[in-house]
Amino acid sequence: MSTERAPGRTRPPTSTGDPRTTVAIITRDRSASLLRTLDALAALPERPAVIVVDNSRDDTTRRAVAGHPAIFRLLRPAGNTGALGRNLAVRHARTPYVAFSDDDSWWEPGSLARAADLLDRHPRLGLLAARTLVGEEAAEDPLNAVLAASPLPPEPDLPGRPVLGFLGCACVVRRDAFLDVGGYHPLLFFGGEETLLAYDLAAAGWGVAYEPTLCARHHPEDHGRSGRAFLVRRNHVLTTCLRRPWPVALRAGADLARAAAAGRPGARRALRETVARFPAALARRRTLPPRVEHAARLLDGEAAGRPTKGAAP
């Protein structure tokens, strides 16, 4: 993990609102969008403390958000941390639960309090995935239906629907569980990194559940982020190499190789980067326990009949 250039800015914790949850945000050169998100979070009845990890290349974002009442701490790593910025934020949080937002997403009023109540009542629950509504029209994110249809059987000590995936900007974690498994994996950096975290939580005995009464709002803008498709392809194969049996990993690698040979967008770059990272994945390989591998196979079968979008359920 990169070290901070400066200790960051800290405000005293608020004496009102719900003290159980911190919101963690990673951002990079998107100060206008970040300000909209901070305004929305500051207006929540829970009044959560917000930790912002600024991966920007200059001081523009820091100057833009200076003095914003929502920010509890602003962290400035020495370089772009990608998804690992969330690990940094969780380590600096002082609350039992941490909700994640992106710089273009926030939470609906009451959702963070409901999430904290569920985590209070279910001590094995490690992560809650929320329903996500997209844009001004509040359209259902397609992943909502995927998570709601998860074929994993209900677990009596967990709320909602058991899953092995979620949207990174629409989840709430138990801080101790997140730190227990090491948070997001450094090999993936960014792009489809959620599935590996869900695998690791489940392997450690923590529950991962989708709860549609929790709601996050996502207002994505096109800032050249469509190029992330190659990262998702790369990280899917690396995730299978890190945690799944070799036949599963080899099938994923072969699928990527065929896509690269067919000239599909981003596939050749994804294949090159997968090959470059394979030795590190091999060194860190740790297969899932049988009960989690069984759940992953159920989801593999369910996903085989539909296009992949985002993290697996």
Image (spheres, rainbow, N blue to C red):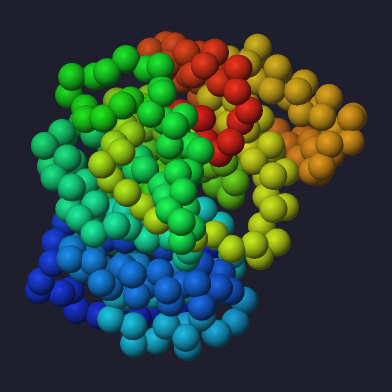
The total of numbered circles placed on residues is 0
Against 259, is 82 above or below? Answer: below
Against 101, is 47 above or below? Answer: below
Q: 291 or 41: nearer the eye?
A: 41
Furthest residue to the front?
137
Residue 178 image-quadrant placement: top left
Instruction: Answer whether residue 102 is visible to the viewer in this image.
Output: no
Residue 223 image-quadrant placement: bottom right
Instruction: Answer whether residue 109 is visible to the viewer in this image.
Output: yes
Q: Position of residue 162 (x, y in %)?
A: 33, 25
Q: Position of residue 187 (x, y in %)?
A: 59, 43
Q: 160 or 59: nearer the eye?
A: 160
Q: Position of residue 121 (x, y in %)?
A: 11, 37
User: Image point 37% across, 73% down: which residue?
Assistant: 38
Would you say 211 lies left or right of 254 here?
left
Q: Position of residue 163 (x, y in %)?
A: 38, 27
Would you say 19 lies left or right of 105 here?
left
User: Image point 37% across, 43% down: which residue?
Assistant: 131
User: Image point 32% across, 58% down: which residue?
Assistant: 107
Against 141, is 82 above or below? Answer: below
Residue 46 image-quadrant placement: bottom left
User: Image point 18% across, 74% down: which residue?
Assistant: 13
